[in-house]
Amino acid sequence: LIFAFWGAVYFFVERRKDEEKEKRLIEKILLSSRTPILVFDREKNIIYASKEIDNLLGYEDIKSKLIEDIYVKEEEGEEEEGVMISKKGERIPVRIKKSRIFDELKKEIVAVVWVIEDLRKTQRITFEKERFKTVLTQMGEGVIVFSKEEGIVFANEKAKEFFGIDDILGKNRYGLFGEKADKMIDFDEVYEREEVFSQIVEFNNRVFIVTFSPVDFGEGDYRMAVMRDVTEFFKMRKELEEKVEELKKQRGAILNLAEDLKEKNEELLRMQEILINQEKLASIGELAAGVAHELNNPLTTILTMIDLLLLEENFTEEEKNSLKSIKDEALRMRGIIQDLLTFARKKGESKHDVKLNEIINKAEILLKTRLKHEGVDVIKDLSDIPVIIGNSDRLIQVFINLFNNSIDAMDKMEKRIFIKTEFDKEKRKVRVIFEDNGCGMDDETRKRIFDPFFTTKKSGTGLGLSIVYGIIKDHSGNIFVESKIGGGTRFKIEFPVRGEK
Ligand SMILES: Nc1ncnc2c1ncn2[C@@H]1O[C@H](COP(=O)(O)OP(=O)(O)OP(=O)(O)O)[C@@H](O)[C@H]1O
Ligand SMILES: [Mg+2]
């Protein structure tokens, strides 16, 4: 612009074709110029001032001023520096480029033109740059400032260390990263984005978090990249992740082991319980068989005698009723003896293919009257299960006892027995779940229910469940019980499927 202006001035002054027209043109150029320009005559009177002079200094009547009023020079020359004083008294550092306009005809200088440069901006930039440099040099992070055109214009020591290049200034992305540059950093994005953003970049076998941001020096499109070396951090993180993985694995193993141990322990406890019961059963079984046998003969005699007595005519009605009660009690005794004998019966009875679902249905039919009378709902979920080997009569006995106990335990308005059969393919076992919503029992009771003669009932024998237990054992099965006071009782019975133990 300045040179264009000079060309114009020179052209018009030299030719002097139409002086007035030229004058107006020059004035126009001066007025519209974005550069502060002053033109003096030989007496140093200001004859022209560009609009920027008004903006810079703020005088409305600059033409009435003497140059001494508004300018203090610091050094003399064609290009000199000095201070301009604005209307507000502000001292503005300036650089002045002087030119003289020479009249060829008169052979004399007719005017002097000053093109003025406001140094404040430049100084500020320089100052900012310096301050910036000091801070950046001392930073622990690597810092580079760069532009598309100039490449790197600044780099602190750390940055040079990171790149491994001392002579780094002027280097562009290819100079730094080689051909890989575009793969690592999207430089177009760096120049496009006006906000701060970070990226993880790997080079020279290290990992960096690089934060890009635009830098405003008031000129040029500079970007700054702050590089933090996070190699160690990444290494630590990786190690940590590996450790965590390993720990997880170990924990998994420990948990598995714990689970295993728990299972084994439970099994041991079950085995122990089974053994204790078996032992009890064995000894009591022998005793019971003996006693039952001993009792059975006199009892048969008693019953026969009563039947004979009942045939006598001599007794009163009252006496006959007493005799009937004696007979009832004797019959009850025979029932108990029968139970004892069932309980004590040794193995070796005939066994055949048995369908457990049918056994359950038969037991239910036998108890139909009692269930109906007590208002108990039986819900069944019998699935298609393999047959087992067993003795139906004895197995029916098992479920009759379970039904009776459950009915005895009913204490709610809604009385329910739930029976489910299923096949455990993995264990190769047939399973029956027999559950009621009755009164349930406490742990003390639960532990003793399979004991012979253990009962909590007024007229119970306590033989029911020991018989159940004996029969199930005799079928190579198992019985488990879960119960909670007020929460019902659940029996789980398992038999091996035919052909498997
Ligand atoms: N389904 C059940 N709900 C609550 N308690 C039960 C249940 N089944 C058994 N019991 C408890 O176990 C005890 C022992 O039961 P078991 O069948 O061996 O004898 P019993 O029922 O008392 O006598 P019996 O069978 O000769 O009538 C019962 O007295 C009862 O306390
Ligand atoms: Mg019972």
Image (cartoon, grey):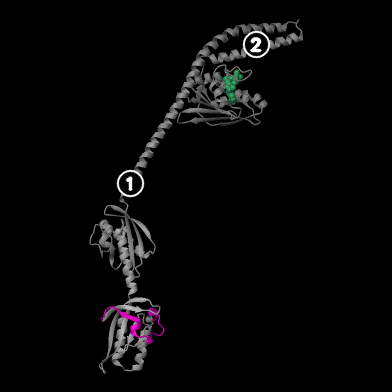
For residue 398, above or below residue 38: above
Q: Is residue 361 left or right of residue 34?
A: right
Q: Is residue 428 left or right of residue 34?
A: right
Q: Is residue 214 magenta?
A: no
Q: Which residues are the magenta region?
A: 54-77
Which residue does the numbered mark 1 point to in the structure image? Answer: 236
In this rendering, the label closer to the viewer, 1 or 2 = 1
The amino acid at mark 2 is Ala
Query: Quick check: which quadrant has ligand 1?
Result: top right
435, 272: nearer the viewer: 272
Residue drawn at 61 percent across, 14 percent down: 335
Q: Is residue 62 magenta?
A: yes
Residue drawn at 38 percent across, 59 percent down: 197
Q: Crowding near pointer 2: few (<14 within 10 Å), some, many (20+)?
A: some
Residue 368 is situated, as x and y percent measured from the top left of the image, at 64, 25
Residue 212 is situated, as x and y percent measured from the top left of the image, at 35, 60
Residue 484 is situated, as x and y percent measured from the top left of the image, at 57, 28
- Cβ(mark 1) to ligand 1 < 8 Å? no
The amino acid at mark 1 is Met
Name the quarter where the C terminus is drawn: top left
Q: Secondary structure at mark 1?
A: helix
Residue 468 is situated, as x and y percent measured from the top left of the image, at 55, 20
- Res. 159 image quadrant: bottom left
For residue 475, above or below residue 118: above
Name the quarter where the N terminus is drawn: bottom left
* Disc 1 from disc 2: Cα separation: 87 Å
- First in sequence: mark 1 or mark 2? 1
299, 222: nearer the viewer: 222
Which residue does the numbered mark 2 point to in the structure image? Answer: 330
- Cβ(mark 2) to ligand 1 < 8 Å? no
For residue 425, above or below residue 63: above
Q: Secondary structure at mark 2?
A: helix
